[in-house]
Image (cartoon, rainbow, N blue to C red):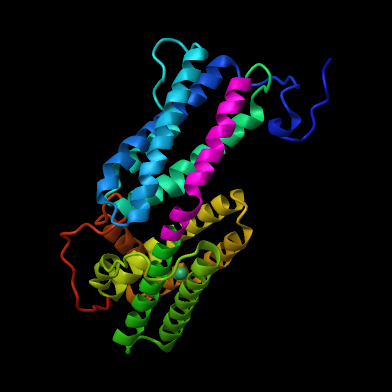
Amino acid sequence: MRREPDHAGPGRLGPDRLTLGYDVDQNAIRFSNYLHVLRELVHLSAGWLALAPEFEVKYALGDHLHDDARAISKIRRRLYELRHPSDYPGVPAEELTELLDRLDQAPTPTEYLELAYGEAKPALIRAFGVHLENLDPVSDEPSLRLLTKLVSQQDRHLAPEEQRHFFHALMDAEICAAELMARNSHEQPEMPWDFHVDMARQTWDEMRHAKLHSLLMPKELGCHWGDYPVGFSYFRSVYAHDLLGRLALFNSTSEQKAMWRHSHRRKVLVERGQRQIAQVFDYLLADEVPHVHNGSRWGTYLCGGDEAAYKAKIRELRAELDETGAPAPNGQRKPVPSRAR
Ligand SMILES: [Fe+2]
Ligand SMILES: [Fe+2]
């Protein structure tokens, strides 16, 4: 006899309910995509392990790549059971290839970790969750058990270390932003007074953002400012430009990307149940709007009021960035501030 389905997940209901889940092919395609992501993570984590400077990170990479390798064996087994036609695992889904390419092209261990633990693993957890919600818990109970295990394993991977690293890097970025805006004001005393007020406000905002992270780290994550290396290359690469270039590259490019990153991170934190930290990101996100506006306001001013000319400048400078968004290393910069008519 058929039971009325309620809103509880399959875990709570127990495997005594029949629903129309995925067909065998859809099921195999999903598992095949997980396999591609995990295979790439094992391969690349094994590659970066030697270059990760901190022992904690090395340890986590070693631990997690072993978990992921075993997960791949189990997924292979499930694919075999599902009798997916001959050439499984099939090619990765189109929407996956972009992520896999970016993982593959990460230029430093920090950027790899940010992608692997900030995007790839959270995406896996989301996909496992959708899969669990939609499968039939009786006919597909092997998938249910396997996926339940995979979710808790990936949750464990994401928990502490990635977040510490991420928040430390974020605090570094906020301080860098405050320093750049303060220098913009200091070096351009001839700019209109409103410019100095805007730069002062942004300097304060960025310092408050840094303070938020410095408070969250010991309270929520058990780490402190200075636990990880601090980078200067980003500051130097933006600082090497004149004011117009800094506004185009920092306010109109990095800060715009920061908005996207903040809202993505917020979503991940809500999914992990970390509502307090997620709420902080709402404020960071709100503050970014005027920061991006500072770029277009004063960039357009420096282009003699010609907004299209400023947009062209942004396009020109963005073209000099490499595919990761970092400035290409060999571009020649003009250090002298130059004001367009
Ligand atoms: Fe900020
Ligand atoms: Fe900002």
Residue shown at 67%/23% (left/top)?
Answer: 137
Q: Quadrant of residue 310?
A: bottom left
Would you say 288 lies left or right of 89 here? right
Q: Is residue 104 above or below residue 333?
A: above
| Figure quadrant of residue 297 | bottom left
The C terminus appears in which quarter of the rendering?
bottom left
**Above-or-below relation of 149 to 201:** above
Q: Which of the pair 47/108 is nearer the observer?
A: 47
Picture residue at 25% right of the left edge, 59% below the top: 327
Near-viewer residue (34 or 180): 34
Q: Is residue 85 in the magenta section? A: no
Q: Position of residue 270 (x, y in %)?
A: 61, 53
Q: Reply yes or no: does residue 150 show up in magenta.
A: yes
Q: Looking at the picture, how far across and down is residue 111, in whole percent?
A: 34, 52
Q: Nearer the viewer, residue 94 or 56?
A: 56
Quarter of image, ligand 2: bottom left
**Residue 194's x, y, as percent?**
45, 85
Query: Residue 42: in sight, yes or no?
Result: yes
Residues rendered magenta in the picture: 141-165
x and y percentages locating residue 197 in the rendered image: 46, 85
Total number of numbered discs in the rendering: 0
Please say whether residue 188 is visible from this viewpoint: no
Q: Main secondary structure of the magenta part?
A: helix
Residue at x-position 50% and y-position 41%: 154
Quadrant containing the N terminus in the rendered view: top right
